[in-house]
Image (cartoon, helix red, strand yellow):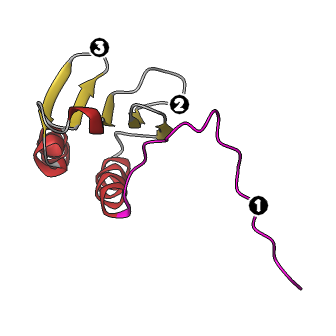
Amino acid sequence: MSATVTPLPQRGGAHQIGFERAELMRILDLYGRMVAAGHWKDYAIHLGRDAAVFAAFRRAAERPEFRVEKRPALRNRQGMWSLVAESGAVLKRGHELGPVLAPVERRLLKLVED
């Protein structure tokens, strides 16, 4: 048997922003720990022209509690990573993913201690 790989068509040659494997593993590790703590139940990933977004939900039918956004266009300004709250407020921005995830990590420690 011969397998043929057919590329998916690109809309107007648009470039799509995505997460690198290490970035996604770091985010999914945090997500898994929050699920184990009983706080998050679902997630969604949106890959677009301007940004890649990972959204974490407490329940499936609501707004995401947190969004982790990667916007490479902001790389040379305030940093391409941002942590956005449910209200839409930007909680943290930065050039590195780890420090941007720190507020959620601290929240996880509080959940586990309680």
Disc 3 residue type? Ser
Given this view, does label 1 or label 3 mark the residue nearer the observer?
A: 1
The image shows residue 48, relative to residue 102, as above or below, that is: above
Specify few, some or many for label 1: CA neighbours under 10 Å numbering under 14, 14-19, or 20 or more: few
| Residue 41 image-quadrant placement | top left
Horizontal placement of 17 versus 103: left or right?
right
Q: Nearer the viewer, residue 43 or 92?
A: 92
Q: Can the viewer see residue 6 in this picture?
A: yes
Magenta stretch bounds: 1-21
Disc 2 residue type? Ala
Name the spot of residue 32 as percent of width and height, x first: 36, 55
Q: Which mark is residue 6?
A: 1
Q: Nearer the viewer, residue 35 or 29?
A: 29
Name the spot of residue 4 as percent of width and height, x first: 81, 71
Q: Which mark is residue 87?
A: 3
Q: CA distance from mark 3 to mark 2?
A: 17 Å
- Give the mark nearest the N terminus, 1 or 3: 1
Name the spot of residue 11 as percent of width and height, x first: 65, 34
Cβ–Cβ below 8 Å for labels 3 and 2? no
Horizontal placement of 76 versus 25: left or right?
left
Q: In the rendered image, which residue does mark 2 sit on?
A: 60
- Give the mark nearest the N terminus, 3 or 2: 2
Q: Quadrant of the N terminus?
A: bottom right
Q: Nearer the viewer, residue 87 or 94?
A: 94
Q: Callout 3: helix, strand or loop?
A: loop
Report the residue at 30% width, 54% height from top: 33
